[in-house]
Amino acid sequence: MRKIRFKKWGFEIFGVLLALLYLSPFYIILTNSLKSKRNVLVDTLGWPEEIMMENYFMAWDRMNFMQTFFNSLIITIVSVLVITVFSSMAAWVLVRTKNKTSSVIFYTFVGAMLIPFQAVMLPLVSMMGPNNLNLINTRYGIIFLYLGFGASLSIFLYHGFIKNIPTSLEEAAIIDGCSTWQVFYHIIFPLLKPITVTVAILNSIWIWNDFLLPSLVLQEKSVRTIPLQMQFFFGAFSKDWHLAMAALALSIIPIIIFYIFAQKHIIAGVTAGSGK
Amino acid sequence: MKKIISLVLVLVMSMLLLIGCQDESAETNQPDANEPVVEDVVVDIFQFKVEIVEQLDALVDDFEKQYPHIDIVMDTVGGGQDYSAALRVRMNSGNQPAIFNVPGPTERDMWREFLEPLNDQDWIQYAAKGTLDNITVDGNIYGVPFGLEGYGIIYNVSMLKDAGIDTSKIDTLSELSEAFSILDEKKDELGIDVVLSYSVGASAWWTAAYHTFNIPFAMQEDPMAFIDSLNDGTGQIYSNDRFEGFFDLLDLFFEYSYEDLITVTYDAQVSNFALGKTAMLHQGNWTIGMIQEISPEIEMAFLPIPLSDNKAWGNDSIPVGVPNFWVVNSQLEPEVKEAAKKFLNFMMNTDRGHRFLVEEAQFIPAFTHVKIQPKDPLAKSIQDYVYAGRILPWVWHGFPAGFNEIDAKQAIQEYYLGKRTRSEVMIFLDEMWQEKK
Amino acid sequence: MNKVIDKKSFWFFLAPISLTFIIVVIIPFIIGMYYSLTDWSAIPGATTRFIGFENYREIFADAQFRTSFVKTLIYAFYAVMLINIVGFSLALLVTRKLKTSNLLRTAFFMPNLIGGLILGYIWQFVFLEILPYVSELLNTGILGARWLSDPDMALWSMAIVSTWQMGGYIMIIYIAALNSIPKELIEAASLDGAGALQKIRHITFPMVAPAFTVSLFLTLSTSFKMFDVNIALTGGGPARLTELLALGIYNKAFTQANFGEGQAQAAIFFGVIAITTLTQVYFSKRKEVEM
């Protein structure tokens, strides 16, 4: 028994050390976000000569942080919401319907995951313009785009998960007189919780950090997201690393707080599948 | 406990939503309250210079006070982002800007259909000689120069004085080489790591691939004719004496600079010079802000970049050019174009505009009627060269698209790594030119 | 059609996402493929000529394209290996019900929050300053290597950064799989006297096989499409020897303003990724069944 406990402690310590190694680049971000521009250039690794809290205020101002953060937040949340709902719906019927049409559709979705974004970028932008769909410079426009680009991976992940759910439940429910929608909403969707959490996390990370797509369609200041506003710290020649690091810290902190609060729910979601 | 946490979460989220919405409504309401009933003209500006965003915003504010019916919307893409790619996207999206930036002949010809001739604007008469060449086709002048920029070998004045070097005499490659070796001998005395701060890669690759690489072209008897001859296949880089000189210069740079030039970043290149770890720096006047941030009192000036000892080549000169132009989109409605021209006039012809150009944006003015003089030592040094007529042109704007950032960069790195010899590099460059022209 | 989903609800459930997907991905992709057969300049109003397979011929004659192709394969091999080994090990570690599990999970996942230029800046600094310094301190040769200026080391450097970034992402997928292993199975094995390694080999591996397929597919396709870290860390240098295909396409299209050829490269690129990854999926699926 003692040996097991000892081993367990070994893993704890190993894990913490590994985590520290993993997080060490954040040390550079945090310390440099508190240095003067000169201090960053002269001594990147050391402790700040003088704590410059004003970097955070300057970064806040220059990014128009409140508005920008709100844009990132709303675009990420709504996109993830529509992606999870619509892709789980699609994946469910694709798994349960076993015919050629269904598998052709599924493989089209999966195959599209391999399309390099650069290959669709310019034609896409011409289509989004005022002469066609008129989706430039709107939040719902980019949410629509994220639904399209997020479809493949999400359907793929849901598809893999749903395959392992027995059909008996849904068949019973239909016999009890439920409609197809009710079966999905009351029986299937709750069962998908673990994979929904995974899908939501993966999509949030992607959308939150995405630069290329928003840079194409969010051209006006009022709708810009955090990654776009970061460019104001990078001049053609001189780069304000100290402000960029402060801005990065500003945008990471709320997520970490959210994550710590929401972790109980997230973990409950990920582990909910273990019982079955 | 769980309930409390969920409650907090909900509260935080709804607060964020509320704040966001308030911000937005405040923003949309404001113009309504202030604007008179006159119909607004919206002028979209799409520019690349991230460094001057705040200064430009202030200029726009003052302009809008004077012209309340013109609404200027400023948008910037630059700073590590590809402006020309973003411009293409912007044009394709149908949301076209009224004022945008064009750096030189290649892009000028690309966007020719979209350029409004500006010949009737009265700032044209004040433009310094040669500053409009790159934006003129068949007598039509399509753009306003941002300002002038120059580059060369920046040196630490007091350090060279200590080493007993007379900088006024350095106008040939032998003399530069002599100065390098003197400095190298006195390394420990001067407290420097190496003589010259240089780079052929990392975030400063363009130092070599644009700036050094420009010199052998600029020193041709007629640079434009040389480029034309490369284009029609009658001329070549291989065996051209200016390019032989270019490789002599590179050999010298490689000998007296850092051990691994591939990984020297722009930050490292400039700050090492500013910290006094090197005596010289191959860069331009745009480094002033960063250098002064580190050493506010450092005394500096430019040396030319000589390729040989031949006085006829212009070995005593430094390359000075116009980095970019403001242009007006010809395909928009007449009233938008008029308003756009008004804004450019405001920038070029008023005291407020001149203050913006010289003091706020720190450009070296390309116009003779700008009376405010730049104060920083590098800009002053460049002006001295300009007044003495010791200048070379910037010709890379006439190269095939991508030639600098792809082929010249690759060629110089391969030469540095010893993967290709001089003549192999020159043959490679000739081949790539033929492929891309 | 089965009893639960009739034809009407099949299309009803599928419609919203499929229509979006067609408009956003499929149609632009088809337009893009058409452009690969033209000399498109991406300037509105300019004439576009149809030139057949000219662009494709050019690409096959292009030595740089071949270099990029080979380098991409090598990089993908390094990255897929590293990311999956690290991701799986991390998942094993945090599912051990440690006191610090939650904290560790957060820590390993955090690198996903940094992207773009800052990522490049930090890691350049790590490779150029910190590692040589540590190497001097510990007197080891390996850490002091020319991480970014040696073309082969630079590929490893990129793989290391991608692993740091994506390891936590892949970890999430493996965690879900590991958690779905019934506890009774492991308890039974323990009672039968199976050691830790035996349990991993005979229970864990087979049970997470589907997750392997998914993760391999994901890492393979993202490694092929790798762009961010490439441009931020090496910019394709030295001497274009670390210019992977995605960056090559970008350079062709935007830097050299040759959009037709860029689109053609993208088409070939798509073909290559499709063949490789689908082969991978095919083989690992077969493995799954065997296990």
Image (cartoon, rainbow, N blue to C red):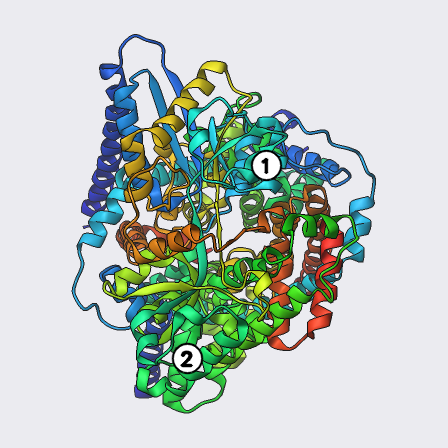
User: Are the residues under marks 1 and 2 on the same chain?
Assistant: yes
Q: Quadrant of the N terminus of chain A?
A: bottom left
Between C274 and A71, the one lying in front of the other is: A71
Q: Is residue B41 visible?
A: yes
Q: Chain of mark 1?
A: B
Q: Determine which of the numbered discs, if any, sits on residue B108 in the image.
A: 1
Residue at the (24%, 43%) spot, across then down: A61
From what the image shows, is residue B265 above or below residue C265? below
Spot the residue most to the top: B37
Task: Give the SS element for disc 2.
Answer: strand
Q: Quadrant of residue A170?
A: top right
From what the image shows, is residue A207 above or below residue B284? above
Residue A81 at x, y = what percent? 42, 37
Residue at the (72%, 71%) spot, across then down: B423
The residue that disc 2 covers is B194
In space, the residues marked 1 and 2 are separated at their CA atoms by 41 Å
- Under mark 1, the amino acid is Arg
Task: Give the SS element for disc 1.
Answer: helix
Residues at marks 1 and 2 touching, judged by CB atoms closer than 8 Å: no
Q: Chain of mark 2?
A: B
